[in-house]
Image: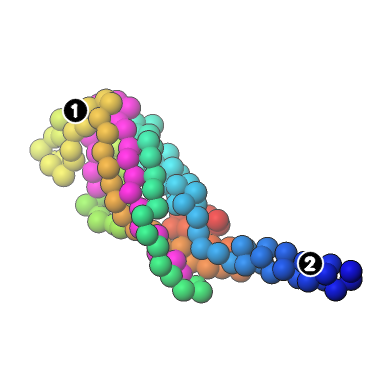
Amino acid sequence: MSRLFHSVFSALLASLLLGCSGTPSESAGRQVIERRIEKQSNGLIELVEFKKTNGAGDASTYQMEFSTTVRYKANCLVGSLDGRMETLPDFRAIPGTRPSAMQFYLTGKTAGETETHTGTMLFQKTERGWQGPDGNLY
């Protein structure tokens, strides 16, 4: 009986430890995007759907590929407001319907319009867990 208990206990402990060392979840990726939208969009964009489409990594890094659909809550101008290109979608938005001559890099969106973005995000393994591109631990 003691041997059976020891075997079951060892198997349970091993599965718990392996679960802790897994890769970042789809939920972690979704949280990164939700926080990015909240920080960048001035309340003009909402996340409709997030899907992890692929992922690969090693013991110290994990690259998650994803697809996300957003909805514009009001008429707005979106785009890279500083001209930077990133692997994560840019969700910076400002109220308005038409860009000025100096905002030629912005695109007008109408309330209710949806748009799908794809991208990649890199997670770094730390002693306390996986650190996302937003600096938070998952």
Residue 42 visible: no
Q: Which residues are magenta?
A: 61-81
Q: Left or right: where does residue 131 sit relative to residue 43? A: right
Residue at the farthest left position = 101
Quote the CA–CA distance across marks 2 and 1: 62 Å
The prevailing secondary structure element of the residues shown in magenta is strand
**Tally of numbered tags:** 2
Q: Nearer the viewer, residue 101 or 128?
A: 128
Left or right for 1, reference 25: right
Q: Nearer the viewer, mark 2 or mark 1?
A: 2
Q: Position of residue 123 (x, y in %)?
A: 46, 63
Across and down, in percent, residue 90 comes to 30, 47
Secondary element type, mark 2 = helix
The disc, 2 or 1, on the residue closer to the chain's N-terminal end is 2
- Quadrant location of the C terminus in the rendered image: bottom right
Residue identified by numbered label 2: 9
Q: Which residue is mark 1?
A: 97
Q: Amino acid at mark 1?
A: Thr
The image quadrant where one finds the N terminus is bottom right
Pick the residue in front: 52 or 92.
Answer: 52
Image quadrant assignment for residue 110: top left
- Name the residue at 39% across, 48% down: 51
| Residue name at image x 78 percent, y 71 percent | 7
Q: Nearer the viewer, residue 92 or 34?
A: 34
